[in-house]
């Protein structure tokens, strides 16, 4: 009997003009994950225009029809099925305008599907995703403080979809003049590798 392999889903939203520092932290996290879960399969969803489409009138109507037919194999649900299959999820996104790049919101629109990743009950939403832990990694130019709206939002949606455990790593203040960028990155990498 073949045991089902664990699956990691990396939602890569590291849009950048340079060698993304968010992506560097994500790579380190994935290396550690692979050491701790040697047999795990990694799926990658690159949240970028073209891969994900914003929902509009046409796509909402089509989606409603497919949900009614319970046609879960439809290509429109590829990302939602991939999300539901994951045992662990890593979301990597730079801190933009107090949250994250808008394309990540579009990705979320694509995976929140009634009766596939969550369902509505009389008691409220019931998540259908068995993911054991979602990790969120971000880097910010300035201080984040209480305004960690990207992580708060991802946690909110994750809870709706059934995820209970969340973890965040963030490196902040990277664009402040005179910042010790290497030091801040090294400190965050240390937390990722040993924390
Ligand atoms: C479009 C855009 C919006 C940004 N918004 C913020 C912000 O609201 N607060 C902040 O501290 N830094 C902001 N930054 C700076 C980035 O958070 C910072 O440079 C980050 O490290 C970029 O990650 P990367 O190296 O992975 O691209 C913004 C950068 C861009 C390009």
Image (cartoon, rainbow, N blue to C red):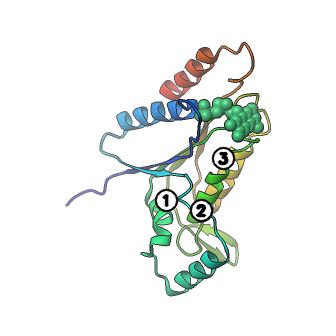
Mark 1 nearby-residue class (10 Å; few <14, some 14–19, many ≥20) = many
Measured Cα–Cα span from mark 1 to mark 3: 19 Å
Measured Cα–Cα span from mark 2 to mark 3: 21 Å
Contact flag, marks 2 and 3 (Cβ < 8 Å): no
From the top left corner, tell me how far across and down residue 194 is, in percent.
49, 25
Q: Could you tell me if residue 139 is visible in this image?
A: no
* Mark 1: secondary structure: helix
* Mark 3: secondary structure: loop
From the top left corner, tell me how far across and down residue 185 is, in percent.
58, 21
Query: In which image quadrant can residue 137 be found?
Result: top right
Q: Which of the image's four quarters has the N terminus?
A: bottom left
Task: Report the disc number at residue 29.
Answer: none
Q: Is residue 2 left or right of residue 76?
A: left
Q: Could you tell me if residue 63 is visible in this image?
A: yes
Front in this rendered view, residue 112 or 19:
19
Residue, disc 3: 101
User: Which residue is at 53% across, 67% downward?
Assistant: 128
From the top left corner, tell me how far across and down residue 34 is, in percent.
37, 37
Beta carbon at label 3 within 8 Å of ligand 1: yes
Contact flag, marks 1 and 2 (Cβ < 8 Å): yes
What is the count of numbered marks?
Answer: 3
Which tag, 2 or 3, sits closer to the chain's start? 3
Which tag, 1 or 3, sits closer to the chain's start? 1
- The residue mark sitting in front, 2 or 3, is 3
User: Which residue is at 55% across, 67% downward?
Assistant: 117
Task: Report the disc number at residue 161.
Answer: 2
Residue, disc 1: 83
Determine whether 115 is above or below 142 in the image.
below
């Amino acid at each position: 009997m073949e045991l089902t392999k664990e699956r990691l889903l990396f939602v890569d939203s590291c849009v950048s003009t340079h060698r993304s520092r968010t992506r560097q932290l994500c790579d380190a996290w994935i290396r550690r994950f692979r050491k701790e879960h040697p047999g795990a399969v990694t799926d990658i969803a690159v949240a970028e225009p073209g891969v994900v489409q914003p929902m509009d009138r046409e796509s909402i109507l089509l989606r409603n029809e497919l949900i009614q037919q319970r046609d879960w194999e439809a290509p429109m649900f590829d990302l939602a099925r991939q999300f539901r299959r994951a045992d662990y999820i890593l979301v990597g996104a730079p801190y933009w305008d107090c949250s994250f790049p808008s394309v990540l919101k579009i990705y979320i629109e694509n995976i929140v599907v009634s009766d596939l990743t969550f369902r509505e009950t009389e008691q409220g939403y019931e998540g259908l995703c068995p993911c054991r832990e979602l990790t969120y990694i971000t880097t910010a130019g300035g201080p984040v403080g209480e305004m960690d709206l990207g992580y708060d939002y991802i946690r909110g949606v994750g809870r709706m979809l059934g995820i209970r455990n969340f973890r965040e790593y963030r490196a902040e203040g990277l664009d402040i003049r005179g910042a010790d960028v290497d030091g801040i990155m090294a400190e965050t990498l240390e937390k990722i590798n040993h924390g």
